[in-house]
Image (tube, helix red, strand yellow):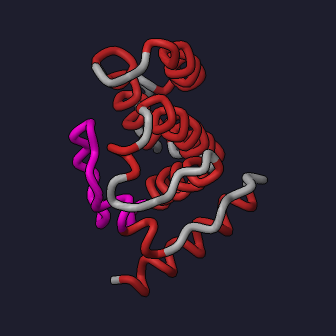
């Protein structure tokens, strides 16, 4: 599995660089630990789901990269040991980057799915810091036109 993770990270880092994103190096162990570590939100996204989706790989690698830029050590406890604001800032950055990538690929089905998920965070996430709600709203407003779109032809 670690060889697969390494291959997917290399492909994803190449994609991120093509998007002009200054991505930090993300190791196989960092992605594995991040995806299998503790969370405060009860997020059920599995490592397998991430490895099977170029969009989720963009999201998770960018999220880890942003956390590293903020000086966080990536291990199984980074999410629960970091301030929630730090985690949400990284998440929102990665969410927008992922959705920009899907938009560039004209994958409106994916955008519809993800804006629906994001709307739940915006409206119902009790962990979302009050001062980050405007950022969440900004991302929602940017992509809400896809909320009721029909699937790709």
- Name the residue at the bottom extreme: 3
What percent of the width, then of the height, locates residue 58? 54, 55
Question: Can you see residue 52?
Answer: no
Query: Quick check: 34 above or below 81?
Result: below
Quadrant of the image for the N terminus?
A: bottom left
Residue at the (65%, 50%) spot, across then down: 69
What percent of the width, then of the height, locates residue 9? 53, 71
What percent of the width, then of the height, locates residue 22? 74, 55
Name the one closer to the observer, 10 or 75.
Answer: 75
Question: Can you see residue 70?
Answer: yes
Query: Quick check: 56 above or below 108?
Result: below
Residue at the (41%, 32%) spot, across then down: 84
In the image: residue 31, left or right of residue 70: left
In the image: residue 31, left or right of residue 45: right
Name the one closer to the observer, 152 or 68.
Answer: 68
In the image: residue 101, left or right of residue 4: right
What percent of the width, then of the height, locates residue 153? 46, 44
Is residue 51 a member of the stretch shown in magenta? yes
Residues in magenta, as a range: 33-53
In the image: residue 68, left or right of residue 30: right
- Residue 109 lies in what quarter of the image? top left
Residue at the (58%, 18%) spot, across then down: 138
Name the one closer to the observer, 15 or 69.
Answer: 69
Residue at the (50%, 21%) spot, across then down: 136
């Amino acid at each position: 599995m670690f060889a697969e993770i390494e291959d997917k990270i290399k492909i994803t880092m190449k994609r991120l660089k093509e998007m002009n994103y200054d991505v930090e190096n993300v190791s196989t162990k960092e992605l594995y630990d991040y995806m299998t570590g503790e969370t405060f939100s009860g997020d059920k996204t599995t490592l397998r789901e991430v490895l099977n989706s170029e969009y989720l790989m963009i999201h998770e690698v960018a999220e880890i990269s942003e956390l590293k830029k903020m000086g966080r050590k990536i291990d199984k406890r980074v999410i629960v040991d970091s301030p929630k604001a730090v985690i949400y800032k990284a998440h929102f950055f990665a969410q927008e980057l992922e959705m920009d990538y899907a938009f560039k690929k004209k994958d409106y089905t994916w955008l519809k799915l993800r804006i629906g998920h994001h709307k739940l965070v915006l409206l119902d996430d009790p962990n979302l810091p009050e001062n980050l709600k405007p950022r969440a709203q900004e991302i929602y407003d940017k992509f809400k036109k896809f909320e009721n779109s029909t699937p790709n032809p």
